[in-house]
Image (cartoon, coloured by chain):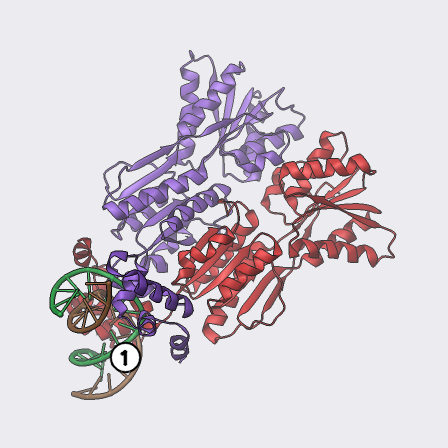
Chain colours: A red, B purple, C brown, D green
Amino acid sequence: MRRKDDRQARATIKDVAEAAGVSPMTVSNVLNGRHQFVSAVTRKRVEREIERLSYRRQASARSLRVAEQRSIGMVIVDESSHFLADAFTCQVVAGLANVLNRADYTLTIQGMPGRQLPASMIMRNYEVGGFCAMVSGPAAERAEVVGRLRALRQPVVVFQEQFEPSDPDLCTVRQDDWGGGRLIGDHLLARRVSELAMIVPRQRWPAIENRVAGVRDSLASTGGTARLTLIESASESFADVQSAIARHLAANPPPQAVIGGNDPIATAAMLYLMDHGVKVPDDVRIVGFNGFEAHRYSRPRLTTVVSAAYALGERAGEAMLVRLKEGAFASRDHVLPVYFEPGSTT
Amino acid sequence: MRRKDDRQARATIKDVAEAAGVSPMTVSNVLNGRHQFVSAVTRKRVEREIERLSYRRQASARSLRVAEQRSIGMVIVDESSHFLADAFTCQVVAGLANVLNRADYTLTIQGMPGRQLPASMIMRNYEVGGFCAMVSGPAAERAEVVGRLRALRQPVVVFQEQFEPSDPDLCTVRQDDWGGGRLIGDHLLARRVSELAMIVPRQRWPAIENRVAGVRDSLASTGGTARLTLIESASESFADVQSAIARHLAANPPPQAVIGGNDPIATAAMLYLMDHGVKVPDDVRIVGFNGFEAHRYSRPRLTTVVSAAYALGERAGEAMLVRLKEGAFASRDHVLPVYFEPGSTT
DNA sequence: CTGTTAGCGCGTTCAT
DNA sequence: ATGAACGCGCTAACAG
């Protein structure tokens, strides 16, 4: 049995205590910074032994004793196994992980299709203190995932969603997509654009809906001579977006501006147009959404709205830490600003 | 104290046992699939109570009892707080997480600058069964990080590195960068290119070195009329790459082909050339390395070598699981193939 | 097939 | 300022 060997190799509090000639309790006090209860000399002695024996605290034993899980679960629901393919999600995870780690919490990450959630270890076992979730898919499925997590009676923070604020232990963190839409509308109106088209995936996200609403409200607020047409794409994939815009152009006159529901959509549309002899931005102006470092590397450089994805992750982590410490979320809906970034496509 | 409430809400094995009128041990047997020891009827009864009471096993208690950590730590050492900004790393993490989750292991992720490693919870606490690491920075610092992890006397899998195989509990997983270099060399030679330049970051990675060596070997194997010049860039950033190539072109005749140490480098170089009236691929051919979905979105489409990053993560997970089960790594160095993907820049 | 006993490593409580 | 006893939830070993 391997455990025997491990025990030899791995020192426990008791081992440290014996080596330092004190009781285990004293070691525990040193470890937990209760300096009031330990004289400076014994403390030094204990610390030296901790160092010498390479003592590391066994997290599971402590967790069991104090009945507290010092880890947060990040659930990414995605049909694709490459659940971290999206740059937005990656930024969120990084921000979340950093905030949690700073508070001596750990981030346990798990990606899966929605139907696998009930079978996942993270749900079947009680091993994290709360959940953060980034969920894709149709609205009904997304709601079901959130419901399942909440059924665990643990705090849940969901990204890029909006709910009726009936559940006190459910918190949402999202960016100001509506405001981003307004910024885009205002920018295009200032350039005298009156015929706009926006390409959106058939399967609408709340974020996309808000972006559309923002553009609409911008146009409406200026008297309403400008018009926005929605172009539905079967999915966000390169091919689907290209065929969607091809279909649209076959039946309609070209718009003066095309807004992508996000950057990849905008880029796919732009490439289609350019490949068909349309000049950008002279003939058609293009705007994206959710930009990252990536557009530095494309020509022409896409005008876009930059997401504070990393900050979203940070905010979620802070909200969760407050919930865990205070017993309740301080705020149950967080909305972070976005920034307009002009490129050379408008 | 909150624990009291939690206890009411969260059922333990004992609660389930009492509700089902059996002993805790029987419940444990049901939970662990020891069906031989439990009759079908009591099993059904127990399962019903588990369901009814929404019982979830307390991972820390089990972990303590069986002296086994069912989690693997993924350490990403990066100076930037956006440690998941790199698409390659994200793919690796996704593959790793999926393999581990399938085996009922959890992935604990933590990104940090190298100097923070010793202070991190994941190191100070004993809470994961092993480590996977993706480390950036100068060679000496990378080696130090790996050394620190290994000093914990736990199994370590490192990505994209190569070591002398002296340590039996250290395993490397990397892609065939040398082979990728060869593919690039062969491709360019077939197009009669004889003056090549390769842009590499000053701070060399083993992966980059191998790519260079592969190109060199390809050129050498054909008689050696073709020449490869290295261009050193201060970093991989857009700006540094652009100034590196500008400096080079000021003092040398333009090469017939430029190979980027990776895709962003190649793209930055390509954009510089195109912005200065150079035709790609007519005047200069361009090749990248480590391509992902992203190049679908750039024009002209970059010729590149596609990395099996997701597969690297999977392989690392499999290696770690074998190590944990069998007590030793089956193989201590894994090399995965790469694929040549022709674009329109060659 | 099922129950009993004991103890994993840690921290709290109470005693000294 | 330090120590002893106890128990967190779970399962290995053994008894029945």
Instruction: Work out whether B112 lies above or below B309.
Output: below
Does residue B66 lie above or below A229 as drawn?
below
Secondary element type, mark 1:
helix
- Image location (x, y in percent) of residue B126: 29, 59
Q: Quadrant of residue B295?
A: top right
Q: Where is residue A209 in the image (x, y as percent from the top left)?
A: 69, 55
The residue positioned 42% from the left and 35% from the top of the image is B204
Question: Of all residues shown, which one is farthest toward the front?
Answer: B41
- At x 53% / y 34%, what residue is drawn? B263
Question: Is residue A179 or residue B164 the one in the foreground?
Answer: A179
* Residue B279 in picture, x, y percent from top left: 65, 23
Q: Which residue is drawn at 36% across and 53% down?
A: B104
Query: Residue A321 at x, y = what percent?
Result: 47, 68
Which residue position holds label 1? A37
Q: Is residue B7 above or below residue A254?
A: below
Amino acid type at mark 1: Phe
Q: Which of B91 and B245 is in front in this view?
A: B91
Which quarter shows the C terminus of chain B? top right
> Which part of the image, by quadrant, shows the N terminus of chain B?
bottom left
Does residue B145 show up? yes
Is residue A301 in sight in this rendering? no
| Corner quadrant of residue B282 | top right
Q: Which of B270 and A184 is in front in this view?
A: A184
Label 1: chain?
Answer: A
On screen, residue B154 versus residue B1, left or right, reads left
Q: Is residue A192 left or right of residue B208?
A: right
